[in-house]
Image (cartoon, rainbow, N blue to C red):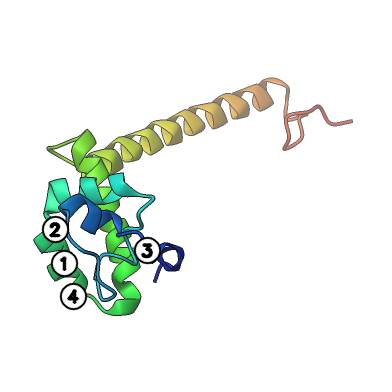
Amino acid sequence: MSSSYSNYTNSPCAACKFLRRKCTSDCVFAPYFPPEEPLKFANVHRIFGASNVSKILHEVAPHQREDAVNSLAYEAEARLKDPVYGCVGAISVLQREVLRLQRELEETNVDLMRYDSFLGGETSAYGGRRG
């Protein structure tokens, strides 16, 4: 659980503040949506709805709730940036970048082997000439 909420017991959590309700000591949102992070709850609420988030938090084991909230927050932010694909779109972009960089690395290695054979194998593994 997030311990940052314990410092703000007089202030309602971001969820209760957003929903304009009294934040009680047993508020399921309080440990995960501290008052200093109002945008985190606003985004999660906009994408998933407070009721669904509450249901998820009640269904998830207490030791997994912080990870669940972080996942929901990440997905909500990704959905706001890319409403169709969300974080899957970001993953696809990164996978394409990895493939492009792997091809570039292969091409560079071929160039290095070509350069090495041009010098007659006189270069070290680090590209310098052998002495």
Cα distance in 3D space between marks 1 and 2: 6 Å
Residue that numbered label 3 is attached to? 10
Q: Secondary structure at mark 3?
A: loop
Of the residues under marks 4 and 2, which one precedes in the sequence?
2
Q: Is residue 20 left or right of residue 3?
A: left
Q: Residues within 10 Å of mark 4 (few under 14, many from 20)?
A: few
Name the residue rendered at 68%, 27% in the picture: 116
Relative height, residue 131 to residue 28 (above, below): above
Q: Is residue 13 in view from this perspective?
A: yes
State the residue in front, 69 or 96. 69
Quadrant that contains the C terminus:
top right
- Check disc 3 and give the amino acid type: Asn
Labels 1 and 2 touching (C-beta < 8 A): yes
Of the residues under marks 3 and 4, which one precedes in the sequence?
3
Quadrant in the rendering for residue 72 = bottom left
Checking the image for residue 54, the label placed there is: 1
Residue that numbered label 2 is attached to? 50
State the residue in front, 102 or 36. 36
Name the residue rendered at 26%, 43% in the picture: 77
Q: Is residue 67 left or right of residue 52?
A: right
Relative height, residue 115 to residue 19 (above, below): above
